[in-house]
Amino acid sequence: MASANSFPAEDQFLCSICLDVFREPVSIPCGHNFCKACITRHWEGKNRCQCPLCNEKFNKGLKLRVNTGFKEVVENFRKRRIIANNDVPVKPGQVPCDCCSGNKFKASKTCLVCLASFCETHLEPHQRVAALKRHKLTDPVQNLEDKICKKHNRMLELFCRKDLTRVCALCTEHSTHDRVPLEEVYEEKKAQLEEKMVEVQEMIQERQKKVQEIKEAVDRQRKSKDEAIANSFQVFTTLVVSVERNLSGLVNVIEEKQKAADRQAEVLEKELQREINELQRRITNLEHISHTEDHLQLITSFLSFSSTSSPHKNWSDVGISGQHCVEDVKRALVKLEDTLTKEMERAAQEFRVCAGKILAEESDTVKKTLSTVTDLETLPEGVKLDTIRQQYAVDMTFDPRTANDLLLFSEDFKQVHTSHIWWFGNDVLHKFNRYAYVLGKKGFSEGRFYYEVQAKRKTGWDLGVARESLLGKKTFTPNPRNGVWIIRLRNNTKCTALNNAPVNLSLVKKPERVGVFVDYEKRLVSFYDVDTASLIYSFTDCMFSNKIYPFFSPGPPEDGINGAPLVLSPCKKSTMWENISEFLWLIFTLIALVLISLY
């Protein structure tokens, strides 16, 4: 007997039509072999028979007989191949053969009629026996028992669209429902899955495109910024160069004027000195004449002196020319100031319009970005407070309707202090036994808000927020249970957070400007020392309900040393054009001072 290694190559045992190992091989006159069923189907309905390989033609009535010798060789090859393919035990994750005893081998097919999986060896009857050939074979099915109807012992090959479950054809409880073959639903959902994958991929591409657009926009913005900075440097450099050039020219003119005045003064001094010398000689002559004792000689000498004296120049209107130059420069400076003022107003107006357009374009995007991206908890305290002041500061005023008669207010309701809390009854001096406080005019029931209070000369105060239900109450205990979240300063040093259990706060120095920040959704009230940008204390998990209002109390008089008011401090946000305008005014002022100092 030939060994297994003496067998021809595997492709010599494959039918060229079905590409599988021959089944009932027949040989046609040209010598080529085919499965009997394959060649019969190939020639069916054709007038002439033709070899699929060499195209040789034969008569229609050609009889096909099984090549029994070759069939035995093919069957022997099939058995050897099955043994070779079936010689490896099943691995984890693979479907085992249900018919193998002892060591299980990997299943080759699963029969949906037999409800079992078979390796190549045990699958052979399904390929040989006519009755078994009609069974439906599929690729190996994992966990076959989970896919079999426990009630009818049939494959769950249908899908109930109503109950979204697998059923068999005999499950009567689903007979009125919409049932379709499971494979059909599988193909349908697979197609939908592919469509969804395409849709998601398009969404990814769309977002990647948007990311690219944002990057390009940022690049354009950066280029515009660089160009704006370069243009600004150029404008201010040109301005400075022009000022320096004109200043240098003005200084040169003034220096030339001064040199001319020096020359003129030198000439005048020489002429004046000459006349002084002449006048001194005349005084000497006059003194000599005055000592003459002869009356007639004195008269004749004096008349002779008078007749020979030359007229003298009147120096009262003589002066150094050029003093009018100072007045001219001053008038030029006034005119320059008017011109610069008009030009600066025009430039500032143009800048405001330009900045307004830029801010209008970026305002919505910035606000949305800040509201969704800004995470205050991740910021350092100083940066956090600056961000809070810029984004959430509100214009606050006191509401005198919520105050008692112990408090006095300024006309703009931005300042409050405690009055003399004394009254007379039955000729006896008494104290009011009431809590002097006032609420802010604006209440809040959502979002975030921030306000600041100046307490520089105060030795005591209470600051925070309170529920709307506090309105009208004259006496109460301030703590979170009663809807009040405040911190208190007493005796200029003792600072306390009035929590359910009071908390003593250790502060390095008394805060002179206190910021109060409230996050309604996060139920948070935080107090800041604005001057040091440090957190004083935070109330968390606050039980807000309805509106809450800012709460203020200027504190008791404390023997008359706590009479200073609490002042609501605006959180001013300076604009870019204001800063530039101030810078331009500074430049102009410096130039004017330099020019004026020359005179």
Image (tube, rainbow, N blue to C red):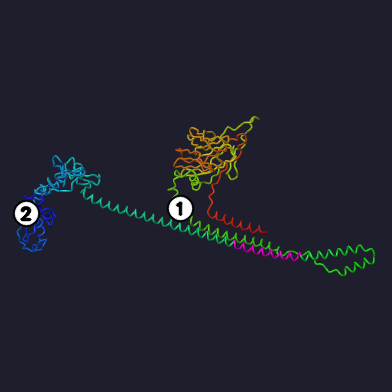
Q: Residue at x 18, y 48 (%)?
A: 139
| Residue behind mark 1 | 364
Label 2 Cα crowd, 10 Å radius (few <14 / some 14-19 / many 20+): some
Q: Earlier in the sequence, mark 1 or mark 2?
A: 2
Residue 67, percent from left and from top: 5, 55
Residue 155 within the magenta-colored segment of the rendering: no
Q: Is residue 98 above or below residue 69?
A: above
Residue 257 within the magenta-colored segment of the rendering: yes
Residue 408, percent from left and from top: 60, 40
Disc 1 versus disc 2: nearer the observer = 2
Instruction: Please identify the quadrant where the C terminus is shown.
Output: bottom right
Magenta region, residue range: 244-269
Q: Residue at x 19, y 41 (%)?
A: 145
Q: Residue at x 89, y 69 (%)?
A: 304
Label 1 Cα crowd, 10 Å radius (few <14 / some 14-19 / many 20+): few
- Kind of residue indicated by mark 2: Phe
Cα gap from disc 1 to disc 2, whole angstroms = 85 Å
Q: Is residue 297 above or below residue 170?
A: below
| Residue behind mark 2 | 70
